[in-house]
Every structure is written in structure tokens, then in C-alpha cells.
Amino acid sequence: MAAGLTAPARPASRPTAPPSASRPAAAPRPGAASAPGLGALLPDDRLRRLELTVTRRLNGLLHGDHRGLLPGSGSEIAGSREYRAGEDEVRRMDWAVTARTGVPHVRETDADRELSTWVLVDGTASMDFGTADLEKRELAVAAVAAVGFLTAGGGNRLGALVLRGDGMRRLPARGGRHHLLALLRGLLTAQHAVDAARPAARRGRPAAVAAPAAGLPEGCAAMGGLATRRGLVVVVSDFLDGFGTDENAPPVWERPLRRLAARHQVLAVEVTDPREQELPDVGVITMVDPETGRRREVDTGNPRLRRRFADAAAAQRVRLTEALRRCGAAHLALRTDRDFTTDIVRHVHAQRRLALASYARSPGGAAA
């Protein structure tokens, strides 16, 4: 915890109380002894009937279900042009424009292209925390599973870049259900491998050798090199890095994320735990920074301290929301104590309503 609790900075790991202190109020989460399997993190039938709305035009090479940048064989009307004898087919005639102008016209369509989705997953030590049904890292894998099912089909591909304490791990983009399940297993394996590599930090002691961790700025910059074709980029993180003491300064990851959003459609999935928003009144506890092993005793029985912590956490969430809005990224907030499937379904429906409203306001949509 940062000195003075001016901001909830990097969240501490699970609070560990000394023998003389009272234990935290949160009950042990189910299955704490063993992490949930892949089957428990897969989405239910509510998500399998939905699809993420992608409004950006794509420049893929294969035929798919999404609107492309260039004219070609597709289902979306791009406009009309004059008929060219010997080149155009009669079945593409635009009879309404032909009758209005008196000159034969044919319809032009935008090519339907496949969707390439890349997921940037925060696998740093701060994600190894949770006081409810899931840990944040498990909820992050569940979010990737939901994105995979929501974007499946039509030749679409899914890849991932995992930020870890010892660098980054790239999982190549491919299509198909078998690849999605293999990618999810790879995410769980990557998380467990990092957990095994930092036993000292989990016990609250500084690690003997600290490898430089890859943060969101480096991850966003690397993602720009991986996602070469226009598509969907999903960033799954707690977004607690990069906020300085200056409330007017943007987070360090805002500029690289804005560069990503200039080319791709970006979805920011914020993964949080209720104990990061407010502290319970459980007496004196020892907070441990999971990334550095730094320890600090905190008297949660002090109402002024709890109020300052809650105010600082709320202010930081406001800064996060404003930063994501400036980047042009959609924001999906998931919590470890809520049904993540319900939150995702609501987000998908809300994004679809926004896309339909935007289409209705456009000249082409109004004409249609």
C-alpha cells in the first residue's frame, strides 16, 4: 500500500492477519484450496447465443461475417454507380436509383471479412487476488473465454498476449473451438507457472531476484505490432498501474492504448475485487504487495482510514473511466463477487443498441 493511502495503487495480496489480530470479515472463497478448472470458467448458454458488435471496418484477407474496408462480395450496401455493359451483372441492378435518375445503376457492396481478435491479458502478481467467488486472474480467464465464444465462427481468429512478471508470452491467433480451449488452457498454465516462480512474494517476503515485469504500456505497444490487420483488441486487466499522484496527469498506458484504438476496436475489461474498493472493519491486518513482497500493517478499525481508502479508490475509478473514454475504448467492469456472465450480456446488449442508434443517425442508415 502506498504511504498515506492516497490511492489504492497496486492492490495488496490477500490480507494476512498476525496472531493477535482479528481475521478479515470476508469468508474463504469456495475452492480456495484448489483453483477452479477450465470448465468452471467457460460461459454458459446465455453467451453462446450472443455476438459482439464490431463497428470498425476490417481489412482481412478471407471471407467472413464483418464489413470490410474495400468493395467486394458482401451483404452491406456501399452505394450505387452507373451500369457498365459487359462488366456488371443484371441481378445487381439498383432499380430505385435507375428509375430516379433515368440512367442504369448497379449496387456496390463492401466485402465481408473475417475478424481477428487479440486479447491482452494482465497476468502480473496483482491479479492473484480475490476475496469472493473467484480470484481476479481466474475472472480474467473467464472473460477471455467469453470473448472467444462471442467472436467465434465465420473464419474468425483469436490470439493472446499475456503480461507476466518475467516478461510477455504470445499465444498465436487461430480459429476454431479446439484452438480456443487450448488458448484458455495456455492462459491457466501461464498463470500457474508464474505463481510457482514467485513463492517468496506470496509469503510476503521480497524475492531474491526480481525480474522486470511487463506493464500495460509495454503490452499495448507490443500488441500494436502483433495486430497488423484491423480487428478487435481486448485488454483484460485491473488497470491499477500508471496512476501517479498528479490527478491531472493521464495514466502511462493511455497513449499506447489510444494508438491501438485509432486502428482497432478496443474493449477494456476491468477486473476488480470488492476489497479494492473498500476495507472491512477487521482490526489490524498486514497488507502484502504481491509484486514486491512489501508489507504494511493497517488498522482497518480506523473509520477515517477506511473512508480515505474508499474515496481514493472511487477517485481512481473515475480517472480510469475518463482515460478509457478519451482513448475511445468500450469499458466493461467485472467483479469477483458478481455473476460475470450477466455483466457481459448487459454490455453486449448495450453496445448493440449504441451501434444501431449510430447507424440510424448516419446518412446511409437514415436512407435505409
Image (tube, rainbow, N blue to C red):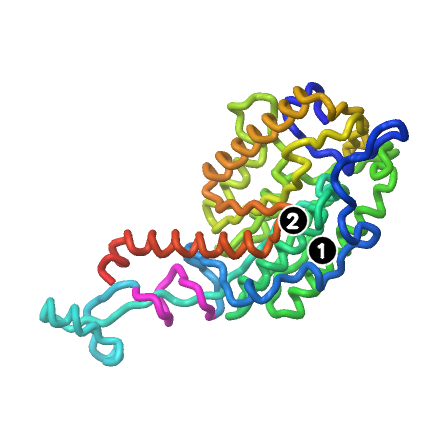
Residue 24 visible in the current orientation: yes
User: Magenta residues, as a range?
Assistant: 63-77
Q: Secondary structure at mark 2?
A: strand
Q: Which residue is mark 2?
A: 121
Judged from this view, the residue extending furthest toward the left is 102
Identify the image quadrant of residue 310: top right
Residue 206 visible in the current orientation: no
The residue shown at (49%, 52%) is 347
The residue shown at (35%, 56%) is 356
Is residue 351 left or right of 151 when viewed as pictured?
left
Q: Secondary structure at mark 1?
A: helix
Up-down relation of residue 116 to residue 197 (above or below): below
Marks 1 & 2, CB-CB < 8 Å contact: yes
Up-down relation of residue 319 to residue 258 (above or below): above
The residue shown at (66%, 50%) is 140
Up-down relation of residue 143 to residue 178 (above or below): above
Q: Position of residue 3 (x, y in %)?
A: 71, 20
Q: Which mark is residue 10?
A: none
* Type of amino acid under label 1: Leu
Is residue 70 in the magenta section?
yes
Q: Position of residue 153 (x, y in %)?
A: 53, 69
Up-down relation of residue 342 to residue 261 (above or below): below
